[in-house]
Amino acid sequence: MTLREPPLKLPRYSQNHCIQNEINNLEKEHQPVNFKIKQLDQMLHKAGAKAIPKYRKIKSLKTCGKGIWNSKISQKSKEAKRANWQWKNSKNSNSDSEKKEMVRRKRELRQLQRQAHASKKDNMISDIMQASENDSKTFHKLIRMQRSNSNINTDILILDGTKYTEDELMDGWKIHFEKLATPSMNDSFDVERQNLCKLQNYIISTSTNTKIPITPTTCKEVMNAVEKLNTGKSADENGIQAEHFRNAKEELAPLLCEIINQIFQDLDIPDSMKSGILTPILKKGKDKNIPGNYRGIVVTNTFSKILESIIKDRLEEQLKKTQNPLQRGFTEKASSKFTAFITAETIALYRKLNMELEVLTLDAEKAFDTVNHDIMFNKLYQDGVEGDMWSLMNNMYKGMTFKVKWDNHLTDNINIAQGIRQGAKLSTLLYKRYNNTILNSLTISTLGAKFGDIGVASPACADDIVLLGPSTEMQAMIDVVQYNTRRDLVKLNPGKTEVIRMAKKNNNVSSEYTLEGQEIKRVQKLKHLGITYQENNKINLDERLKMGRQTIYALLGSGLHARSGMSPVVLMKIWNTYVVPRFLYGLEVQNPTKTDIKKLEQLQRKVCRQFQCLPERTSSIAVYALTGAEPIEVTLDKYCINLFFGIARLDSTIEKQMLLWESANANANDTLFINKIAGILEKYGMHTPMELLINPPSKHMGKTMIKVQ
């Protein structure tokens, strides 16, 4: 097996003057961008080779069993095989002695294997305990190794009824992703719209009136972009990682600035920056033999990440003004919980007012992979991205390619004729602009749910859109979405679209809605952004308890006690880090009852007792005092305060407007969030919600306040 090249742990290049010396030796005359980037890659590799022993040496190891093979096991295995051969080939009809010898040798082999497994487990536990104290990164890495499932690769692919095995596997991957990257027209699509966008884009690209130059970048802007590169990631196709740039950003900044400014001037993106390596990642709980169950994550050129980061920072401020306020995905200082907050509070208000409310979740097939490039760039132009910046981004997506990587093999280049690369810096920004039209159309229509006088009909997190409204308007909202998706060449999946009634039954008659000619499935519970909504408005307690148990058992096995060799302190750190956030996820936007919290608390106390080998009769105070654990109620209070502070810090957002409306209109016995947070703040002696909404604490101050209280 060939191991993946580990992330670089580079000493600072400047200490050995490696980078600076290489920069001084570069050819100074004007050269094409492609040539300069190639020189840059060679220079980084050369400097790395001088600064690091055994630079880029990839080890090849032969793995046996589960990595427990050693010389003793190897010797016993040979003896067991020899004894088995002697027994099978014995001419003596009464071969009991040979059989007994064979059984003895096999027992000795299994004994050594069990000892090796136990030794490996002890070493893992020792490493986790040591890392938990002072090396957070290693701690999380070891935990992920323990919980990961190594059996994720498949030896067979089934694509459109055809099986691809062994040597044909790469052909199967190529055919699948090639088909995905090639536009396919549906009979319901508005092809005329695409043709019109093509014509408009051609006029824009050839018109001299739209030639607005791009403002040159600066060394400071380049260094900020380099600082944003994520470390510890895979190298790109040329073997360059983020660490190459981050460990020498001051020395490299002038050169990078020069190359990027030349790109801004020439409006030409080299082919080397348009290529990437796509790795199929299996979606959770899906059949690994079906290619459609994989998500393609692309490792893009590292230098292109710097360029895209600079462009993204410039465009985000410009495009943020026209972004629909109900889009909370990939938005600074916002999260998916804000989308869930809008949905949950709207449900709570409609139940309070005894008004009918339907909740419908939409599903678009391969949303990121089927974005039409002509329409996408036409929308960007309509949103105000003009001149050379528009031309540069348009050129960036022309001739784009990727190779599929599977089991250390690569396919040939595949041309990307549609879709955006999941993993590229600009992808999130481009997708938000693409589906912004749907949200704007729903807002302009004034259809759907209202929170007071605030329109909350379509909260969204990237491609996850939920429709909120009465049954009398829901079909009209679906038609608006359908009209826009057909114009954008997006295919909705009626089979995965679901609807649930969350407030006031209308004469016990269920309304029927259709999408693309098919009836939408009505359900009694519905999951959106990881949060389950039930028709009776209760939380999914049994599912959460089951998830908590399954998570901790998957991490530690069934032996949840100190005798396993791990200290209770480390066990509690694993519980608090990996389990608690998972089985409490989203409860801050829902309304768990005291009984719900009590049952969640019982699970935590039971686990804490098992961690410490304490009897069932041990008091709760003793259980928590010995481990320093927080009661579930306290943890939920912290989650609620964090969410409240996050919303309070954002001015002119839908969420803050909703909280201000609740402050002015809510009654004391309402189940709205403002009442819940008011009780929590009063419990800990903090300011009132209105005072904090008017004068919100900074992020650092908010964390300090929570910690002190």
Image: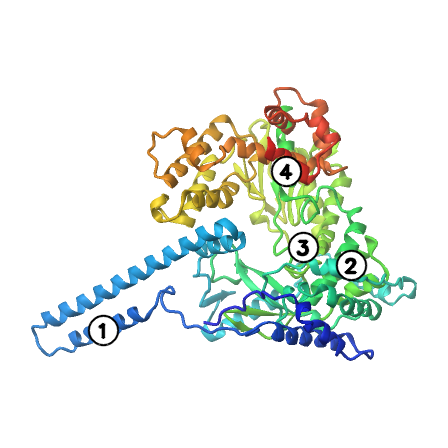
Residue named by callout 2: 221
Q: Residues within 10 Å of mark 4 (few under 14, many from 20)?
A: some
Q: Is residue 277 left or right of residue 321?
A: left
Q: Between label 4 and label 3, give the one nearer the viewer.
A: 4
Q: Residues within 10 Å of mark 3 (few under 14, many from 20)?
A: many
Distance between mark 3 and mark 1 Cα atoms: 64 Å
Q: From this viewpoint, which residue is outermost toward the top?
A: 668
Separation of marks 3 and 2 at Cα, in angstroms: 36 Å
Q: Please name the amino acid that badge 4 sits on.
A: Lys
For marks 2 and 1, give the CA distance.
66 Å
- Answer with the quarter of the image where residue 242 lies: bottom right
Looking at the image, tell me whether mark 3 or mark 2 is earlier in sequence order. 2
- Quarter the N terminus occupies: bottom left
User: What residue sits right under mark 3 in the picture?
Assistant: 490
Sequence-first tag of 4 and 3: 3
Q: For the point 72% across and 31% down, which residue is it?
A: 693
Q: Residues within 10 Å of mark 1 (few under 14, many from 20)?
A: some
